[in-house]
Amino acid sequence: MDNEQKVEMMAEKKIWAVIGATPDPKKISNQIYHTFKDYGYEVYGVNPKYEEMDDGSKIYSRLEDLPKTPEAVDFVVPPGVTMEHLQGMDPKIYPNIWLQPGTYNDDIVKYAEEKGFTAVHEGACVMAYIRINKRVK
C-alpha cells in the first residue's frame, strides 16, 4: 500500500488519539485535535503533561488509559518521543499511525514498518487532508 492509499484508509477511521495534544490553541497538536472534533471524529488527547484540553476534554497520560482503543494514532511530538511510544505500542492493538511532519526520521519509519504498523508519513498532515477533503463522519 503506498502512502496515498494509507492516507485514504486512515481518513476513514472514526476513533483517533493525538499524542502530544495540548490545551494551547497556538500549538499544531491542539489544532489537529480540534480539526478531528470539528469534522465529527471521536478523538482523545494523550500527553502526560496536561490534564485537560481547552474545550474541557480530558487529556490522558497514556494510550492505555483511553476509554476506547483508537483506530489510528496521530503523532505530534519530537522524533525521540515518537520512538519511545512506538517501542511501547503493539501494532496488533494500534495498527495505524500517522507521523506528522517533524515527528519522524528514516529510522522511525523503518522501525514502524518492520514492527508491523501501517504508517502514513512522507510529509502528510492529517489536519490539512481532513480540511481539504472535508471528511465528515
Image (tube, rainbow, N blue to C red):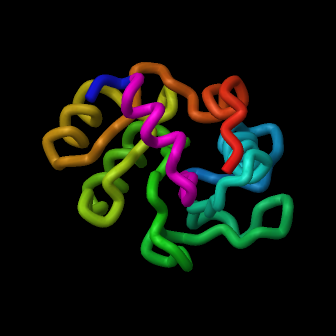
Q: Which is nearer the eye, 108 or 67? A: 67
The answer to if 15 sits in the magenta stretch is: yes
In the rendered image of this protein, does residue 91 appear above or below residue 118? below
Q: Which is nearer the eye, 69 or 88? A: 69
In the rendered image of this protein, does residue 103 appear above or below residue 18? above
In the rendered image, residue 122, in percent from the top left (x then y), is placed at 40, 20
Q: Residue at x 81, y 38 (%)?
A: 26
Q: Which residues are magenta?
A: 4-19
Whether residue 121 is visible here, answered yes or no, is yes
8 sits left or right of 111 in the view: right
Where the N terminus falls, by quadrant? top left
Q: Which is nearer the eye, 105 or 7? A: 7
Q: Residue 85 lies in what quarter of the image?
A: bottom left
Residue lying at the far front of the rendered structure = 137
The answer to if 13 sits in the magenta stretch is: yes
Q: How many labels were placed on the picture?
A: 0
In the rendered image, residue 105, in percent from the top left (x then y), is placed at 33, 27
Q: Residue at x 57, y 66 (%)?
A: 48
55 sits left or right of 17 in the view: right
Residue lying at the far left of the rendered structure = 114
66 sits left or right of 9 in the view: right
Q: Residue at x 26, y 47 (%)?
A: 117
Q: Residue at x 50, y 33 (%)?
A: 100
In the rendered image, residue 96, in percent from the top left (x then y), is placed at 37, 49
Whether residue 84 is visible here, answered yes or no, is no
In the rendered image, residue 35, in percent from the top left (x then y), is placed at 73, 43
